[in-house]
Image: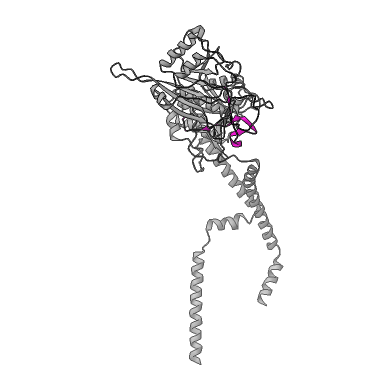
């Protein structure tokens, strides 16, 4: 019995020793952090000290933020595709510019992500300056560039050259994914390059043969082209007798009367010198006798335009219940590679080309740019008001945009002459680039809808060999994040509410401890109950 009692005592003692070691080990492992304990016991107990601690944290926070702003550090870009970080390609394009470039953000807030992006150009080239201004603060800029109170915009300026960008120029919309995509970097980079360029392309618009002109139905295009740093002039070929030698691109708009012999010969000479043409041709409503116009077109393998217009039956390829307002499909081309928002053609006509063998004989290479859908049709009978395709209508699809490159001279190594190629960009519509409104209920011109403006501007930029003026966004497809008003409220709540909550908790803890310290009888009662 005694042996059993001793054995139980040893077992109990061993168990207590084991538990003691375990307890000591846990205490060692859970040794409290001295700094945290100091904060808890000396700062959070006292309400005044708690308040001072929170204020110190806020001062440090705002001090660091202010210091980072003063240092002008590049903000951290946590977006998946580094949407707000200047790419090496853009840095390379601007780093050797030896002219002073000023970028003015009018009406923008200092914390705008586009401004953060723009400031990165200043690090790539110290001659690029970025400044956030207001209309009231810089009335000289407002007067010079036509800004009024409440307006916002970006001015990229180099001497007398400038480009003005609006918010809509900095984003594009992907209809397939319903995403808003930022093209801010591409637009800023191209604008900087454009205003810094020594060469200003000259674009001439042929006058006297069309109802479309820069001063009548294409005034918006005139403004947009000048904003692209181009010199725009109207060409009265009967006065000059030729297409000027400094012409980089000749624009021909829907001829309604035939070219005379002077114009015909001048344009043929221009083509044979290896220079370029943009041809816009709207629907043909009546039979026309334009032999000289057709002679020019035939040099590129384009047959005469037929009487009639294209209509759509596919609701996804037309503007709401308007079969004559078609949305053509884009083929891969440098001009259209970034046009994702679609186009709107009004009263379009089809482009008829000779067969491939004939094109080869003419030394012409064809590249398709725009086509209509298979559900479209071509109607020659304008008296037929039905929206349904009839047996007399021609079924689609139809070519409504193409590049035709005509080789006019071979390279000659003996004489050192280079190969000459004349480019023709031709579209089976003219209204898309005009001031004509979309409908009677709106005053907005067609050129401002979807990406009509981009198509015509990109076409001219391509023909004058200004690749930097062609819209080109980052290869991402990432949605540009813009905080909504509700999201802003949540963010502000987090920033200011958290410190306030900490202060309240500190005060509550202090009050509780004060009450606890002022009621010794309560503690005495607890001890007595514990003994019992």
User: Front-most of 78 and 23?
Assistant: 78
Q: Nearer the viewer, residue 369 or 131?
A: 369
Q: Quadrant of residue 314?
A: top right
Residue 199 visible: no
Please say if 8 is above or below 210. below
The quadrant the C terminus occupies is: bottom right
Q: Is residue 219 visible?
A: yes
Asked if 137 appears above or below 113 in the picture, the reply is above
On the image, the x and y values in percent for residue 108 come to 60, 31
Q: Residue furthest front?
A: 391
- The residues colored magenta run 306-334
The magenta stretch spans residue 119 = no
User: Residue at 67% of width from left, 60% of height from top?
Assistant: 513
Q: Nearer the viewer, residue 516 or 460?
A: 460
Q: In this rendering, would 237 be left or right of 515?
A: left
* Vertical arrangement, residue 140 with respect to residue 511, above or below: above
On whether residue 330 falls in the magenta region, the answer is yes
What x and y, as percent, mark residue 94?
45, 28
**Relative horizontal placement of residue 475, taking residue 379 as reference (left or right):** left
Q: Position of residue 55 (x, y in %)?
A: 62, 46
Q: Quadrant of residue 152?
A: top right
Which is nearer the eye, 293 or 395?
Answer: 395
Furthest residue toward left:
414
Describe the colour scheme in one phrase. one colour
């Amino acid at each position: 019995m005694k042996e059993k009692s001793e054995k139980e005592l040893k077992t109990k003692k061993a168990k207590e020793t084991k538990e003691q070691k375990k307890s000591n080990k846990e205490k060692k492992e859970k040794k409290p952090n001295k700094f945290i304990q100091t904060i808890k016991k000396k700062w959070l107990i006292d309400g005044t000290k708690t308040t001072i601690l929170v204020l110190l944290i806020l001062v440090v926070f705002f001090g660091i933020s202010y210091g980072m702003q003063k240092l002008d550090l590049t903000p951290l870009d946590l977006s998946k595709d580094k949407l707000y970080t200047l790419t090496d390609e853009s840095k390379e394009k601007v780093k050797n510019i030896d002219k002073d470039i000023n970028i003015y953000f009018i009406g923008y807030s200092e914390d705008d992500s586009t401004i953060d992006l723009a400031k990165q150009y200043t690090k790539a080239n110290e001659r690029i300056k970025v400044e956030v201004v207001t209309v009231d603060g810089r009335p000289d800029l407002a007067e010079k560039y036509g800004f009024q109170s409440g307006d916002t915009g970006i001015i990229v300026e180099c001497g007398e050259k400038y480009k003005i960008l609006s918010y809509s120029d900095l984003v594009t919309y992907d209809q397939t994914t319903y995403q808003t995509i930022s093209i801010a970097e591409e637009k800023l980079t191209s604008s900087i390059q454009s205003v810094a360029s020594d060469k200003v392309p000259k674009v001439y618009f042929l006058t006297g043969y069309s109802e479309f002109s820069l001063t009548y139905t294409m005034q918006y295009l005139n403004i947009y082209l000048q904003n692209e740093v181009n010199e725009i002039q109207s060409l009265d070929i009967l006065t000059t007798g030729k297409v000027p030698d400094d012409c980089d691109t000749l624009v021909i708009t829907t001829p309604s009367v035939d070219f005379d012999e002077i114009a015909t010969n001048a344009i043929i000479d221009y083509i044979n010198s290896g220079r370029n043409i943009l041809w816009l041709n709207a629907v043909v409503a009546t039979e026309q006798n334009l032999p000289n116009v057709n002679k020019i077109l035939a040099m590129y393998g384009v047959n005469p335009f037929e009487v009639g217009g294209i209509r759509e039956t596919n609701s996804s390829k037309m503007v709401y219940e308007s079969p004559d307002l078609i949305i053509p499909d884009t083929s891969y081309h440098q001009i259209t590679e970034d046009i994702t928002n679609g186009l709107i053609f009004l009263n379009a006509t089809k482009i008829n080309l000779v067969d491939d063998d004939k094109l080869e004989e003419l030394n012409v290479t064809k590249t398709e740019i725009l086509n209509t859908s298979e559900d479209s049709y071509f109607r020659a009978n304008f008296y037929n008001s039905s929206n349904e395709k009839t047996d007399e209508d021609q079924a689609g699809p139809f070519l409504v945009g193409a590049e035709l490159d005509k080789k006019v001279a071979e390279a000659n190594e003996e004489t050192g002459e280079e190969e000459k190629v004349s480019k023709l960009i031709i579209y089976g519509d003219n209204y898309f680039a005009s001031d004509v409104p979309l409908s009677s209920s709106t005053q907005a011109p067609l050129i401002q809808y979807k990406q009509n403006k981009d198509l015509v501007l990109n076409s001219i930029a391509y023909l004058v060999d200004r690749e930097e003026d062609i819209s080109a966004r980052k290869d991402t497809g990432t949605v540009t994040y813009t905080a909504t008003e509700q999201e802003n409220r949540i963010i502000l709540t987090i920033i200011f509410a958290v410190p306030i909550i900490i202060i309240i908790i500190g005060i509550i803890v202090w009050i509780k401890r004060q009450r606890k310290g002022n009621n010794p009888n309560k503690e005495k009662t607890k001890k007595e109950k514990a003994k019992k």
